[in-house]
Image: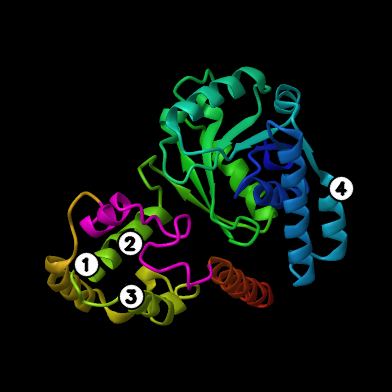
Amino acid sequence: MSAHALETAAVIGTGMMGPGIALTLALGGLRAAILSRSEANAAAGLAKAHAQLDLLAAHGLADPAAAARARQALTATTSFAESVEAVDLVIESAPEDMEFKRDLFARLDSLARPSALLASNTSGLSITAIAARCRRPERVLTTHFWNPPHLMPLVELVRGERTDPAAVEDLRALLLRCGKVPVVVRKDTPGQLGNRMQMALVREAVHIVAEGIASAEDVDTAAKYGFGLRLPVYGILEHQDMVGLDMGSAIVNYVAQDLYNLPRAPQLMNDLVARGNLGVKTGRGFYDWSVKSADEVRARRDAFVLDCLKRFRRDPGPR
């Protein structure tokens, strides 16, 4: 199947990710159905996708004609089997539970047409393991959209051990058509690509706080106003080449001796969890969320991403 033959899709999940993924596909020209177990959740997912579309249109990131077509292309349903049987692409965005995903993909494999592509939005689980009970594992792969999916350009395509490379290329071409920036992860490995780098940052950031080197606030400030500010246009390895690998390797050899290198989360993080301080959901984590607004943080994040997307649209530049 070539990318132009991907015309219909079903997206499983109406929570944080599903509606934005469905909207992305609709903007790329696909008829996209949002699947949910209940009519209420299906309707809520569709309303969320429409609100996201309105946001993109208001910021000039979806022209009126494309927005109108996408709105017509989006639907919501609870008819699981009928929807899966009828589409060229199924993307699952369900909880990160391996057994649940294995059972779900085995069912998808039994219902979907032989040519259909089956994709998981997992942020780190093995797609090879998820496809273990499928008869056609060559049609199964990961499409990891970054949150929020209607805004973030990156999508990681992860090949399982038996994924057909042509299936990866079909989805890569489709995502380009949808305005996304796909990258191919050639080996099915824990954490994929982006999360492996992000986990290294998380571990060291927590370690710095635990060691009393800096406060949580100053750690985040250093990330936001230091290296983080230039990352959208100046990659990590580009920087190493620019400063010179002789200098870069010398610095890594010196600093690496003092970095957090244990194969587990830093103890401070485990202690916070043990005390029930889970972050926004409980009101306290590294920050006191009774005096810090999660809604304001999300709004500030999304406004910044929107500004970046507008700039990228004006001047996409080389990748």
Dot 4 falls on a residue whose secondary structure is: helix
Residue ID at (65%, 48%)? 21
**Dot 2 or dot 1, earlier in sequence:** 2
The residue pinned by badge 1 equals: 210
Q: Nearer the viewer, mark 1 or mark 4?
A: 1
- Magenta stretch: give its range: 265-293
The residue pinned by badge 2 equals: 202
Label the magenta part by its dominant secondary structure.
loop
Spatial CA span between label 4 and label 2: 41 Å
Badge 2 amino acid? Val
Q: Residues within 10 Å of mark 4 (few under 14, many from 20)?
A: few
Spatial CA span between label 1 and label 4: 52 Å
Q: Nearer the viewer, mark 4 or mark 2?
A: 2
**Dot 2 or dot 3, earlier in sequence:** 2
Dot 2 falls on a residue whose secondary structure is: helix
Name the quadrant containing residue 73.
Answer: top right
The residue pinned by badge 3 equals: 219
Name the quadrant containing residue 52.
Answer: bottom right
Give the vertical position of 109 relative to 90 (above or below). Answer: above
User: Which x, y percent locates residue 193?
Assistant: 40, 52
Spatial CA span between label 3 and label 1: 11 Å
**Dot 4 or dot 2, earlier in sequence:** 4
User: Which x, y percent locates residue 270?
Assistant: 26, 52
Give the vertical position of 193 relative to 14 (above or below). Answer: below
The residue pinned by badge 4 equals: 72
Of 188 and 279, the residue lying toward us: 279
